[in-house]
Image (cartoon, rainbow, N blue to C red):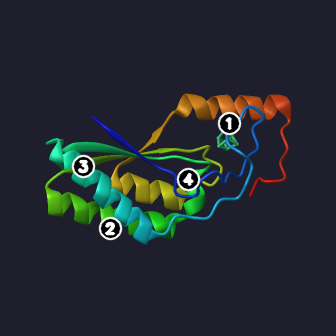
Amino acid sequence: MPTIIVRPVGNTCNLACKYCYVDAVVSPNMSIAIFKKGLERITSFYLGENIKNIEILFHGGEPLLWGLNKYKKAEKVISESEEKYSIKYIKCIQTNLICYDSKFATFFKKITILLVRLLTVIKVKILFDYAKMDLKHLI
Ligand code: SF4
């Protein structure tokens, strides 16, 4: 199954892991219009290959910084695309969980979004404790 990697906030993150490969810069947030356009374009390509199951991986930086409202709007776009093209998206998010709360949990459970790479998160937590990393970006 192919994966569409979406980086809705680019490199922006609320942690500053010393081993991180992304530059510690604040990137502009992706608009829903751009998300929709990108999803349409890439989905059209896979439809041409007769592929009907596609993974969408929200990645970062820290993708939860996009905000719950943006995820709700993105879900509407995703659902419309599923209906229009008779395809199925498997939705995943790679997150450090710093912003993850009951509102995200309720919504993600409702739309079946998978939290992935939890080992990475655990590693981040361990290194975070161990290295006493810079907290100035923590929100
Ligand atoms: S949480 Fe991930 S993106 Fe953020 S600084 Fe750490 S490794 Fe980089």
Residue shown at 84% from the left, 53% from the top: 136
Marks 3,2: beta carbons within 8 A: no
Q: Give the percent coordinates (x, y) of residue 53.
A: 22, 42
Type of amino acid under label 1: Tyr
Position of 126 with respect to 28 (left or right) is right
- Residue picked out by circle 1: 21
Mark 2 or mark 1: whose residue is earlier in sequence: 1
Type of amino acid under label 3: Phe
Secondary structure state at the residue bearing disc 1: loop
Q: Give the percent coordinates (x, y) of residue 92.
A: 41, 44
Q: Give the percent coordinates (x, y) of residue 137.
A: 79, 54
Residue shown at 36% from the left, 40% from the top: 3
- Residue picked out by circle 3: 45
Secondary structure state at the residue bearing disc 2: helix
Alpha carbon separation for disc pair 3 and 1: 30 Å
Residue shown at 76% from the left, 53% from the top: 138
Q: How many marks?
A: 4
